[in-house]
Image: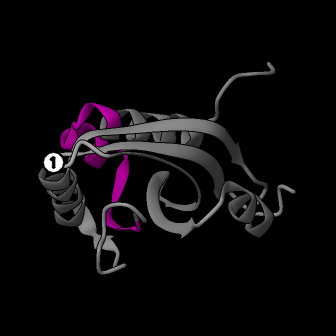
Amino acid sequence: MAGERTPAEERLYAFADAVTRRDPDTAIAQCHPEVEFYSALASVEGQAFEGHDGIRRYFEDVVSAWDEWRVELHHVEEVPDGRLAVTMTMHVRGLHSGAEVAQEIGHVWELRDGLLWRCTAFPTGEMALAEAGVK
């Protein structure tokens, strides 16, 4: 039926919702134990958050820098090779500065054993869609 999400898409929506709610346990439940997650706005060093401990560190980094961190998903599509192409806007507000930023970005997620495994981040959603062959 049109409009229904695949199990992989459901995992991604649950992960994004967990980020917005600052719920690392729900986020981890969506991820493979060897997850590699890149976040443009959270990792100052530009390195991946690896494994379940890395996802916990991601949440700690978010809490230490941002008063608000909200994920607004615009488009999630599972492509024929099983990857997920994502366009989203990250809405953040600085913990100390109060400065607000909204940045459109894109991700392409690979899955392993039905779980979110490797995320490649892109500076725009269009780049993520192009990489996944959606556009």
Residue at 64% in and 36% down: 74
Is residue 2 a member of the stretch shown in magenta? no
Left or right: residue 134 compared with residue 32: right
Left or right: residue 87 compared with residue 18: right
**Quarter containing the N terminus:** top right
Left or right: residue 53 compared with residue 15: left
Left or right: residue 115 compared with residue 107: left
Residue at 49% in and 51% down: 114
As helix, strand or loop, the secondary structure at mark 1 comes to: helix
Residue 110 location, x and y as percent? Answer: 56, 63
Q: Which residues are magenta?
A: 20-38
The colouring scheme, among rainbow, by chain, secondary structure or one colour, is one colour
Is residue 25 a member of the stretch shown in magenta? yes
Alpha-carbon neighbours of circle 1 within 10 Å: few (<14), some, or many (≥20)?
some
> Hey, which quadrant is residue 60 in on the image?
bottom left
Compared to residue 130, the image places residue 97 above or below, namely above
Residue 40 location, x and y as percent? Answer: 43, 65
Compared to residue 77, the image places residue 105 above or below, namely below
The residue wearing badge 1 is 63
**Quarter containing the C terminus:** bottom right
Residue at 64% in and 29% down: 5
Residue 100 location, x and y as percent? Answer: 36, 43
In-front residue for pair 36/8: 36
The three-letter code of the residue at mark 1 reads Val
In-front residue for pair 38/12: 38
> Hey, which quadrant is residue 106 in on the image?
bottom right
